Amino acid sequence: MKNTSTIQGLYPYQENAVNTILGELAKPEQSRVTMVYQLPTGGGKTVIFSRIAKDYIAKHKRKVLVLTHRIELSVQTAQVLREMGISTKVINNKVRDLEDQDDYDCFVAMVETLNNRLSEESFRPEKIGLLIIDEAHYNYFRKIFKYFQDSSFIGFTATPISSSIQYPLYKDYQKILVGESIPSLVKQSYLSKATTFSFDVDLKSLKVGINGDYTVSSSERLYSSEFMLNKLLSAYEQQCVGRKTLIFNSGIITSQNVYQMFIERGYTNVKHLDSTFSDKERKKILTWFKETPDAILTSVGILTTGFDEPSVEVILLNRATRSIALYFQMIGRGSRKTETKSLFTIIDLGNNAKRFGLWDEEIDWKKIFYNPTLFLEDKIYGDKEGAHAYQRPTEIQERFPNKPEGKDFNISEFYKDCAYRGDKTIQAIDKSIENHLEWIRLNAEDFWVAMELKDLLRDEIRYRVHVYAQLINASENYSKWLLESYQQKLLTLLRQHLDQ
């Protein structure tokens, strides 16, 4: 049974979050606090941090700055803050003169706009005692932090794993506080219960881009194919007919093809929406979606955050992703509970549940916060080495009777050690080269024998590079470069050590 709300609309778990965070900010031994607070999508992060802002301003007599990454979120957040009775100013691209900064207790700004005002020195950062960062997993907030060395930071997110693997959250935030879990919120009837239907899809044709996720171009080719369009239609007609359905695609072409397919099959209750639409067009479509009980909205990207339509009954993932943040953001659009809706359906056409687990499974977010690289490896890359590790054939082993001291080198284990220490994982490749150098030096009488032994290790070198490339999610071109670089470095070292 759902608990009754407490003062100013906060539920008991939300009030507990407010009190816990304010307690951290009030600890006398800490002049400055930087922390992340994790709470699932639909848990009410905005109302929680708005209440924190109100109490912080009253107690500490210092101003609060809320950072968002989208204009819609800035407007929504400012509205909640004002409803809390906080004098709030939105700093958007139309606001250049900030001489009235002393007249407000709280400011809401998009990161790019604020960065410009700080560079122009029109905004005084020394006035701010607390920064609240919404959707803190986005890496581009970091550019602002240098201006607020004396301020406390609280980053709010449903998924405390940075959008950039090079800049994990623990480097900017000292600690993490974990709120109520999805299973707990579902059990207490704060979120809707989900039923997931997974349709196995062959993803071998997908390519991985420099951002670590599948490229739009390779996804478009797969999901715009007649086979996948028919698979989507079949899944929809099995589970979704008559229910309000939100479809997520990775590219505009795919979404347009999905829209066209539904139209050709006689469905009139369908529309397409992407980032190229004007604000007026977008508002019109979202109003239609809200008011149409059996609406089908096929979209790209823009509805993953800052969009709240509780009446959504089906989330259809017509894409694969390697981003756990995106996975939870998409599904979270259907998790809101209403008086007439306590259940929703997830249709997975990208093997996403297999990759990350079901949406309502327990997750150790604290472990992920401190060890994001290992989490990604375990969840995404763990099956990439193949069923059998490389074994040096007997005839080749006989050419290497002398063995380096210590245990046998395992590039996957060394990679994990680097990740645990926070070191650059490319050290695993360097260590592997050193290991092969030592094997050859111990068993070669001269340079020419060394070259022969190096050739015998060709498959083993390829295997090690392949394992590392899969662990870091390397592109095909980068993998080729790694192999070439590995062989060249080994050759150079052999020449140096064997006087050639």
Image (tube, rainbow, N blue to C red):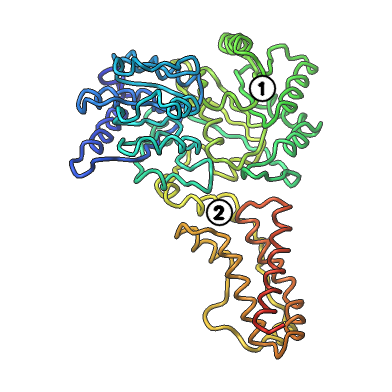
Image side of residue 326 versus residue 16, left or right: right
418 up-or-down from 314: above or below? below
Q: Quadrant of the N terminus?
A: top left
Q: Nearer the viewer, residue 485 or 159?
A: 485
Q: CA distance from mark 2 to mark 1?
A: 31 Å
Q: Earlier in the sequence, mark 2 or mark 1?
A: 1
Determine which quarter of the picture holds residue 120.
Answer: top left
Image side of residue 67 versus residue 244, left or right: left
Position of residue 363 measured from the top left corner of the image (x, y, whole percent): 45, 44
Q: Quadrant of the C terminus?
A: bottom right
Determine which quarter of the picture holds residue 292.
Answer: top right
34 up-or-down from 472: above or below? above
Q: Nearer the viewer, residue 370 or 64?
A: 64
In this rendering, does residue 191 appear at all?
no
Q: Secondary structure at mark 1?
A: strand
Determine which quarter of the picture holds residue 58.
Answer: top left
Label of residue 383 in the image = none
In this rendering, does residue 252 appear at all?
yes
As shown in the figure, which amino acid type bears the numbered disc 2? Answer: Glu
Which residue appears at 68% of the width and 73% of the height? 490
Position of residue 375 measured from the top left corner of the image (x, y, whole percent): 50, 51
Crowding near pointer 2: few (<14 within 10 Å), some, many (20+)?
some
Q: Residue furthest front?
A: 120
Q: Which residue is mark 2?
A: 377
